[in-house]
Amino acid sequence: MLSRSSTNIYSQSLTGSVLAALGEEATEAWARGLSENFAREPRGGDTDQIRAVAAGEGDIAISNTYYLGNLIRSENPEDRAVAEEICVVFPNQDGRGTHVNISGGGVAANAPNPEAAKLFLEYLASDSAQRYFAEGNSEYPVVEGVAAPEWIQTLGEFQEDDLSAETFAQNNAEALMIMDRAGWK
Amino acid sequence: MRRTEPAAAGATSAAATGIVKEGFALAGMRRGRTRSRAPRALVAATALVAALVLLPILSVASSLLSPRTDVMAHLASTILPDLLTNTGILVLVVGLGTVSIGVVSAWLVTQCRFPFSRAFVWLLLLPLAIPGYIIGYAYADFLAYAGPLQTSLRELFGWATPRDYWFPNVYNVWGVSAMLTFVLYPYVYLLARAAFLEQTANAFDASRALGHGPWSAFFRVALPLARPAIAAGVALALMEALADFGTMQYYGVRTFTTAIYRTWFGMGDQTAAAQLATGLLVFVLVLIALELHARGAQRYTQVGRGARKAPAFRLRGWRAALAVVACALPVIAGFVAPVLILVRLHLIGGDPFMSERFWRYAANSLTLAAMAAVLLVGVAILLAYATRLSQARSLRALVRVSTIGYAVPGTVVAVGVLAPLGAFDNAVDGFFRETFGISTGLILSGTVVAVLFAYLVRFLAIAYGSVESGFLKISRTMDDAARMLGETPGGVVARVHGPLLRGSLVTAALIVFVDVLKELPATLIVRPFNFDTLAVRVYQLASDERLAQAATGALAIVAVGILPVLLLMRVMARGESAR
């Protein structure tokens, strides 16, 4: 197994979502099992995990898909070669679905220009802005009718965990403490 | 030990050796009481500086008053042992590493002649231009299992998996400490070199004449004389190492800075984070106390200038080769290799950076760095005079307090700066609303003033350390002599201190300039909206794992960082040839 460190928000969100589904005890057992199977001490970013799998340093890496997308679309042939070495697995397809991170936005309660902020958020949800994120940063568009880039379509459909980001964000602190106890560095 | 000044008459005979160890009074003349008191304005200004520096630190540390939280109990039982071990290893490796590299190379280039020895004088400074996080990113890419080095090795020898061969694992506290050592040793080198140069040849000659061999003279005379400078350098290096965040984070090494960050932002517990920050501060205070204790009552002052330059040992054969290797290795590890790795990354997928936007980032970086350098050196001179003019313990304590900010990680300084400034802005805004019915909005928050405030807190120690070590070498008997010859106090400053201090002041300004240019976390948090510096840009790209794109900006930071290094060398060379 290859993973980022427990200090990283992605690791914390993932553990927060497991916590919401399984409860504290089972989550700690899961995190401990994971940590005991780390091929190396957690370090680096998502891309580093992908590269490490491609190089054979470990068998499985936990990563967000958009980092893979950036490798696939890279101008550097070495990056594209890395992407060809690996395949993508979406876990929990028979259960609650795969954990999903979001690029979200909101308006602060005391924002001086709430109307302008809302207009901006609406713009982010427009077709053109969604295409911008999908093509610029290899992310899944959330607005229906906006086509995902070609390489995302090759990954196929998958069932996603529809747990609210608010919930796993609330679980964040407890998740981090569980990871500490489980020895996830 | 009660310090007394050598009397002027004694100084003449002491000039035969060129050195007077104060405390070994040659005549029992006490200094007058009038001189032990600093002007009131100077005391007030010192107190103000200390208060300004303390404000953000106290605003963070005030959460210590809150009871120990559950999170703190959790941390103590899980990651705290790791933190302490890693921090201990970091201090040990960086401390020993920077002292050995810095002192050996400084001694070689000042006292010996060997192939390229003149070039090494400035080559050895080059790693100063590389921020810790950038050398970390460069080596992370290069030495990784999937990186170019190991991949080529595997292809060359037909290995297939990690089990087929052994490769040193640098992704731990030892590796990070080594990398930081290679970019931090110039602090020791710079100050040790200045100290060795300013040592008069007489002292060394006298010790040789009294029967010491070159090695023994080095350890018994040259090294102890340079000790305040070396200590200042290693203290700077250690504080920088303790405050490093980017490298530790990337390499997954648990130290106080990363723990503070994850406790604050991951567990949402500011109290526990502040308590960890205090733990880090304690580490640094212990370091400072140890050094002060070890230095004890010793004070070294030189009287008069050396009659001539120190003789150069001409090295030949294997000795010359050894000297070249000793000077070349740190330059290669701390500068040449990372730059080549970055150039390679840049060529693979760098940013098209030489655009108008790039120059805006560069202009922002340069402006901030120049403003900070002027401000901080000015304040450092003020503090140094306060220390020089007054023997009062309370004043010295104030000055010490003013320099503790360097030990506080940039992130903590930033939050500590934001809180009081926000409170100030709100108070002013509230007052004007009530009195005049107008809103003043945010006056200081999100301005360059706030950023400079953060730099003042963070980097005053650097400026002060260098200015102070310059002052320490100006004997107080010189002041007395100048006054007896009819100089006014202002004249002493302008015609005695000024010329003697020039090197130290330039050094101080340069180090502040380059450090501000490289500074990341405080700038990132406190900077005005839409005000990006080169460092911020590099960080954003690197944390988005666009290392190749980040390489371009990183190279730009390195390039800009080299310019003042060259300037420094020119000024120093001129000062030396004028001798």
Image (tube, coloured by chain):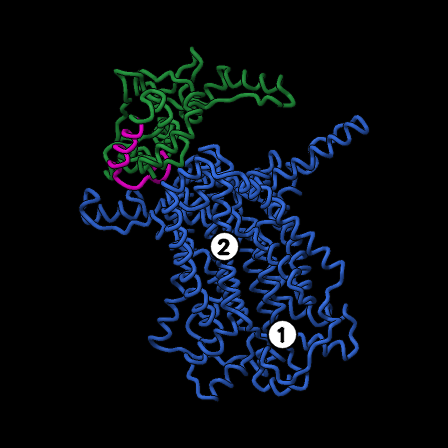
Chain colours: A green, B blue
Q: Where does residue B498 sit, x and y in percent of width and height? A: 69, 68
Q: Answer whether residue A33 is magenta in the image.
A: yes
> Label for residue B429?
none
Dot 2 crowding, Cα within 10 Å, few <14, some 14–19, many 20+: many
Task: Please tell me which residue is depicted at 73% across the width and 34% down the height of the picture.
Answer: B428
Q: Where does residue B156 sit, x and y in percent of width and height? A: 21, 49
Query: Residue under circle 2?
Result: B284
Q: Is residue B354 above or below residue B103?
A: above
Looking at the rendered structure, the kind of residue marked 2 is: Val
Q: Is residue B222 above or below residue B179?
A: below
Q: Are marks 1 and 2 on the same chain?
A: yes
Question: In this rendering, which labeled residue sits more in front, label 1 or label 2?
Answer: 2
Query: Residue under circle 1?
Result: B578
Measure how far apart labels 1 and 2 are at the Cα level. 39 Å
Location of the N terminus of chain A by quadrant is: top left
Q: Is residue B129 left or right of residue B442?
A: left
SS for tag 1?
A: loop
Q: Chain letter of disc 2?
A: B
Residue B414 visible in the picture: no
Given residues B288 and B477, the one toward you in this image is B288
Location of the C terminus of chain A by quadrant is: top left
* Sequence-earlier tag: 1 or 2: 2
Q: Chain letter of disc 1?
A: B
First to last magenta residue range: A27-48
Q: Given contact means CB atoms under 8 Å apart, are the residues at marks 1 and 2 in contact? A: no
Dot 1 crowding, Cα within 10 Å, few <14, some 14–19, many 20+: few
Given residues B558 and B344, the one toward you in this image is B558
Q: Answer whether residue B216 is magenta in the image.
A: no
Task: Please tell me which residue is depicted at 46% across the width and 72% down the height of the picture.
Answer: B107
Q: Residue A60: name its quadrant.
A: top left
